[in-house]
Amino acid sequence: GGLLDLWQDHKGLAMVEAALLLPLILSLTFGIYDLGRAIVLNQKVVAAAQISADLITRERTLNTGEIDQAVAAARLALHPYDESLLGVDIAGLRFDSDASPYECWRQTVGPIMANTASIDDAQGLGLAGEGVIMVTTRYVYTPFFTGVFLGDFEFEEVAFFRGRKTPYLQLEGVSC
C-alpha cells in the first residue's frame, strides 16, 4: 500500500541531505576563512615587532620622532588590516653590573599595556653597560564570521634587538 510506497520513494532524499549538510559546510567554510585571516594577521604582528625594532636599532641615539617613525612602519606592516588596533610598546633596557636587565626608558603607543613582564627574558643578552631594545606588539582580532562562537584572538610578539652602532641606545632627554 500507500505507506510502503512512501518509504521506498527516494525523490527528495538528496534535498534533505543537502539541507542537513549545508549548515555544516557553511560553518566549516567561514571558520576556515577566519582562521586563515588569523594566521596571516599573526605573521603580520610578528613582522611589525621585528620591523620597528630593526629601524630603531639602526640609530646611535634616539628621539621620539624616530620612535614614531618606527611605530608608523609597524602599522604599515599590518596592511590591509586595521592598524589602529595595533599596540606597540618599545623599551630601552640596559644591563647593570651583574648583567641583569633593567628599564631605562619606554614609549607605548596604542592599545597595549607596558610589557614589564618580559624584561627578565632579556637576561643573558648583554654584558654590563650594554643594552637591548625590547619591542612588544599586540593586536586583538575579532573574527568576522565565527567571533560570536570563538571570541577574540589576541596576538602578541616580543622582539629583542641590539644596537648596530652602539652597545646601548639612549633616548634623548633621558639619562640612564
Image (cartoon, rainbow, N blue to C red):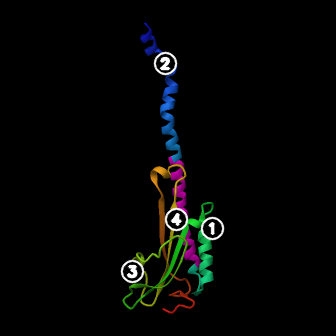
Residue type, label 4: Tyr
Q: Earlier in the sequence, mark 3 or mark 4?
A: 3
Of helix, strand and loop, which one carries label 2? Answer: loop
Q: Which residue is mark 3?
A: 123
Q: Residue at x 42, y 75 (%)?
A: 118
Distance Cα–Cα, label 1 vs label 2 = 57 Å
Image location (x, y in percent) of residue 137: 51, 70
Q: Which residues are magenta?
A: 31-55
Nearest to viewer (mark 1 / mark 4): 4
Q: Which residue is at the front of the view, 114 or 133?
A: 114
Above or below: residue 127 compared with residue 120:
below
Residue type, label 1: Leu
Q: Which residue is mark 4?
A: 139
Q: Which residue is mark 2?
A: 10
Q: Residue at x 60, y 85 (%)?
A: 63
Image location (x, y in percent) of residue 163: 53, 83
Q: Was residue 54 drawn as part of the magenta stretch in this picture?
A: yes
Image location (x, y in percent) of residue 71: 59, 74
Q: Earlier in the sequence, mark 1 or mark 2?
A: 2
Alpha-carbon neighbours of circle 2 within 10 Å: few (<14), some, or many (≥20)? few
